[in-house]
Structures are given as structure tokens and as C-alpha cells.
Amino acid sequence: MTVGKRSQRVASVKREITKAKRAVIRWLLDSDPSIRWQVMRDLTDESDEAVAAVRSRVAIEGWGARLLSLQARDGNWGGGAWVYQSWASTLETLMLLRELGLDPASEPARNAIGLVRAKSTWGPYHNDSPFFEGEVEPCINGRVLACGAYFGEASERLVDRLLREQLEDGGWNCDAPHSKRSSFNSTICVLEGLLEYEKAKGGPSTVRDARLRGQEYLLTRHLFRSLSTGKIIDRDRKDHRSRWTRFSFPTRWHYDVLWGLDYLRKAGVQSDERTDEAVDLVARRRHQNGRWPLAKPHEGKVHFDMEGGRGTASRWNTLRALRVLSWYSAQG
């Protein structure tokens, strides 16, 4: 794509988000404090003081406070560190609290994390490994690292393990070493963990180098195309109900195009022609009312529903999509 045509594309996206923002900002702000503070920070450019004041509410009201209240005395949520076919486990709950933006320095957060650190383990199957040390699968360990780094409990041993498990093509796969090819699902989970670790710790160049290699794995595939055939990958090969071109929240461990782009935004990546098609896809998913819908939620036990059902307008997806489009348009 020529520079002129790409500038036109970016300008078109910028017009679209300006139009959308006018229509939906009030709707986004009329919501839980976990959404409200992020809208204020990322879309309306409020002062740091105003943003912090609303963020502080996450720990004491709404979804954040409700999740915190469900922690058991053994440090866990939902019966354990991770529970099959459940999105109510300790890992999934901490991932969600991280997405809500619970302030790690708040007293409720410190109390909850202290209990996890002191009591939660991965059970006898994993030699009772402490929660923040992780277990064996990179798709789980990447998210454990993301939670640990965010809440001040990053494990250096877990980082080292993830670096050792990186495959030659740059990504990760929970089926390795049997599989030599990386998985989008595993790779995005590890990238989130490594990025959170860098934000918290800085870390050695080996961490950044590994993350950039994994990032390149996504970019060379334009975030949703097969490298060997060039065809769009629409459905997860392990879970054919999960579609990469339709967006759900929470994402759990399921990759989709919006999650891939949102990672690039958070990582401060400069967009190029390899992201254009994915950005166009996100823009096309917007409904005429300026809001993005919730695709079919990933099946499994949850603590409670934060939004409506499949196909209903999603504040989370709308917030995430507008942030991605704003990131993209700002680079034109």
C-alpha cells in the first residue's frame, strides 16, 4: 500500500471514531467504575486526579468489589487455582480484576493477593506449586505471569520457563514439544504476561527480545491469516465455536483479532500494512448505533454476568475497539 493510500485509510478510521465517540461516550460513562475510569483515561483525556478518583471505586463498589467478596478463606475463587470448564477460578478471577483495573496498591487488593500468595497452590498434580509460580502450560503460565506482575508478585522462575519454551517460529504452544508450530492462543497469553512483566520490572533484554519475536509471529500473519496459505483463520482449531473474527469479553484464553490488536496498542507498536486488514475488520463490526456487540460468550461457569447476552451491545468491546482505532488513527 502506498503512503498516500495508507494516509487516506487512517484518516477514514479517524473520522469513524470521532463520529462513534460522540454517540457512545455518555453510554460508556454510565456504567461500572471499572469501565468509567478507563474511558476517562483513554478516550476523554481527563486529569490524572479525576481518573484516579474513579479508579479507586473499583475496589469498593460494582463488579470489582463483588469479585473480591467472593474469595474463599483458602485464598481461592471458584474452588481452586484453575478449574476445568469454569471461568470462576482464581486465575480467571485475577485476570478479570486486572482487566477491571483494580489498583494493586489498594488495601482490598493487597489483602486478596496476600491470601492467594499464602494459601493458593496448583495442587498435588503440580507438586503443590504456589499460585504465582504457575504450572506447566504456557497459555496458563502467561496469564499467571500477567497477574503476578500486575499485582506485584512476578515470578522470575516463571519468566525463565516461558523464555525456554519459546518455539523457533517465535510463538508458544501448549502442545509443545509434540507440536513444533506455535499457537495464536498460547502466544497471546504469553505476550500479555511478558509485557506486564516488562512494565513492572523492566527486566533483561532477553525478555523484550522474546516478546518482540512473539509479537512478530502475530504481525507476519496479519493477526489472523495462515502463514502457509495466506487464508483467513476464522475459527479456533481446538474450539470451533470460538471465532477469531467475532469478539467476546472476557477473552479468557481464546485469541481473537481485537485482542491481538489491543495487545499491540498496549505494547506501543507502530502499526503498518500488516495491521490494516485487522483494523478494518474491527471497524466493520461496529453497529449503526456506534456500539460493538458481544459475540457468543465463551461457555463455562462464571461468577456473574457483566453484560447482556450474545449479540447485545457490549461496553467492554466498544471501549476496547475505540481504543484500538484511536491508537491506529493517531499514527497516520
Image: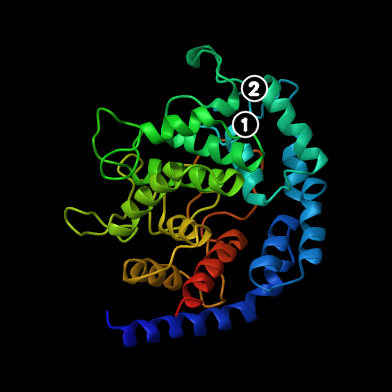
The reply to whether callout 1 and callout 2 are in contact (CB within 8 Å) is yes
Q: Residue at x 61, y 77 (%)?
A: 21
Please, what secondary structure does the residue beneath circle 2 have?
A: loop
Dot 1 alpha-carbon crowd within 10 angstroms: few under 14, some 14 to 19, many 20 or more: many
Q: Quadrant of the C terminus?
A: bottom left
Q: As shown in the figure, which amino acid type bears the numbered disc 1?
A: Thr
Q: Residue furthest front?
A: 204
Badge number at residue 102 = none
Q: Disc 1 or 2, which lies upstream in sequence?
A: 1
Give coordinates of residue 172: x percent, y percent. 35, 39
- Residue beneath disc 2: 120
The location of residue 28, given as percent across then percent down, is 68, 67
Question: Which amino acid does the dot numbered 2 rest on?
Answer: Ser
Q: Position of residue 251 (x, y in %)?
A: 50, 48
The residue at 33%/59% (across/down) is: 219
The residues tagged by marks 1 and 2 sit, at their Cα atoms, a distance apart of 8 Å
Report the residue at 77% width, 70% height from top.
Answer: 47
Question: Does dot 1 land on a helix, a strand or a loop?
Answer: helix
Q: Quadrant of the N terminus?
A: bottom left
Mark yes or no: residue 302 visible: no
The image shows residue 110, relative to residue 25, as above or below, that is above
The circle on residue 90 is 1
x 55%, y 18%: residue? 129
Name the residue furthest left: 229
Q: Nearer the viewer, residue 67 or 221?
A: 221
Residue 250 spot, x, y in % from top left: 55, 48
